[in-house]
Image (tube, rainbow, N blue to C red):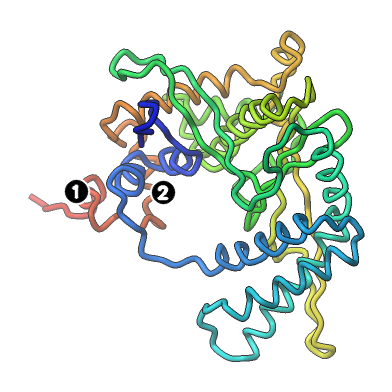
Amino acid sequence: MTDDATTVPVLDVDGLRTALHCPRRYEFAHVHGLEGSDDDAVDDRVDVLRTAICDALRSGETDREALESVAGDRLSTLWNDHDEPFHSGTQRRHERRVLEATLSAYFERVGADHAAGIERLDAKAAGGELIGPGLPLSSAVDVLDETVEAERARIDATVDYVYGDGSSIVGVRFVPTLAPLGRLRYRSDWEGDVAELFTDHFDDESTAFEPDPVGSLFETAVVLDGLRGLRDRLELGDRTCRYVQIPLAERSGTTVNWVRDTVETSLEVVDLTDVYVDHHTYGMTHDHRNETVDDRLARIAAGLLSGPFDPSERWAQIAEHACPDCEYTVCCQEYIAKEVRFDG
């Protein structure tokens, strides 16, 4: 949780998301390093696609068919080494067809345009990597808590690549699904019910519990600030920064023809920039920021750095929403105390 070389405390967006679900879960997973019990096959398949796409983008091709060919060859190699257990050879062949359909949908929807945007941005950048996967970004936040020794902390995030789009640089991250976004998936502005969702989650008088959308807003804040830092390091001027997520395991757009043994799918691309931006703040700074989200982000970071990781403040909501799918209930004192009661 700290960077020994600089003594700056370090957090990451995955840890923030975990803490929003339950501070005790954060303690187990990110402080003590206890591993969860379940392997996630979907995440592993997304990693295969992520690697194949990034390798294709790194090839220098910008033609859609050429990009898809490179990515398809890379997918074939990666899939041969993919050791996920399947019920049958038929299931394995089907899952590969789904991945191939997803690749095709990506390059048809945005892949070629993004490859061209990478090429244009690279031509103007003063060196530096633009393609991952897992391209690191970081944001520095002020820690306004007298119990924490450091005055600033670093929060890390990743994107899979960065491309140029007109006067903007855009960070793209592949995700399994857009479901964690909640209503952010369908909104284009902060003002209104998104702002209400965010403030209600932290309102002691409210029963609202929205850790996933709130975590997505925190992630957007960190990524956009990280992109600003990357922009400055690459000497790309005053370009605005944007953040996009693309789901690679969203089955809602997948159609399977079992007779012809074919799979087709479509991809949704979600830009989270505007849903994060407070336009009043933007009007003053001309930069993509949201003071409400940024201030709360700093407070959460300070709380994680100072501890203790006591979930009692939101225990009713945590027990209802976070405990049922938590992998750490077996060692959670709050959960055990709730479950083990004696009458009398």
Of residues 136 and 333, the one nearer the viewer is: 136
Give the amino acid type for the residue marked by disc 2 in the picture: Ala
Q: Which residue is mark 2?
A: 322
Q: Residue at x 81, y 30 (%)?
A: 168
Q: Residue at x 69, y 24 (%)?
A: 232
Location of residue 278 by image quarter: top right
Residue 182 on image: x %, y %: 63, 44
Q: Which residue is mark 1?
A: 337
Q: Residue at x 70, y 48 (%)?
A: 131
Q: Residue at x 34, y 49 (%)?
A: 29
Report the quarter where the N terminus lies.
Answer: top left
As drawn, is 250 to the left or to the right of 304? right
Gap between marks 1 and 2, in whole Å? 16 Å
Is there any visible trace of residue 179 in the rendered image? Answer: yes
As drawn, is 314 to the left or to the right of 272? left
Looking at the image, the residue that sits furthest to the top is 284
Is there any visible trace of residue 194 in the rendered image? Answer: no
The circle drawn on residue 251 is: none
Figure label count: 2
* First in sequence: mark 1 vs mark 2: 2
Residue 166 on image: x %, y %: 89, 33
Give the amino acid type for the residue marked by disc 1 in the picture: Ala
Asked if marks 1 and 2 touch (Cβ < 8 Å), the reply is no
Crowd class of label 1 (few under 14; some 14 to 19; many from 20; radius 10 Å): few
> The residue tagged with tag 2: helix, strand or loop?
loop
Residue 165 on image: x %, y %: 85, 37
Looking at the image, the residue that sits furthest to the front is 127
Of residues 338 and 168, the one nearer the viewer is: 168
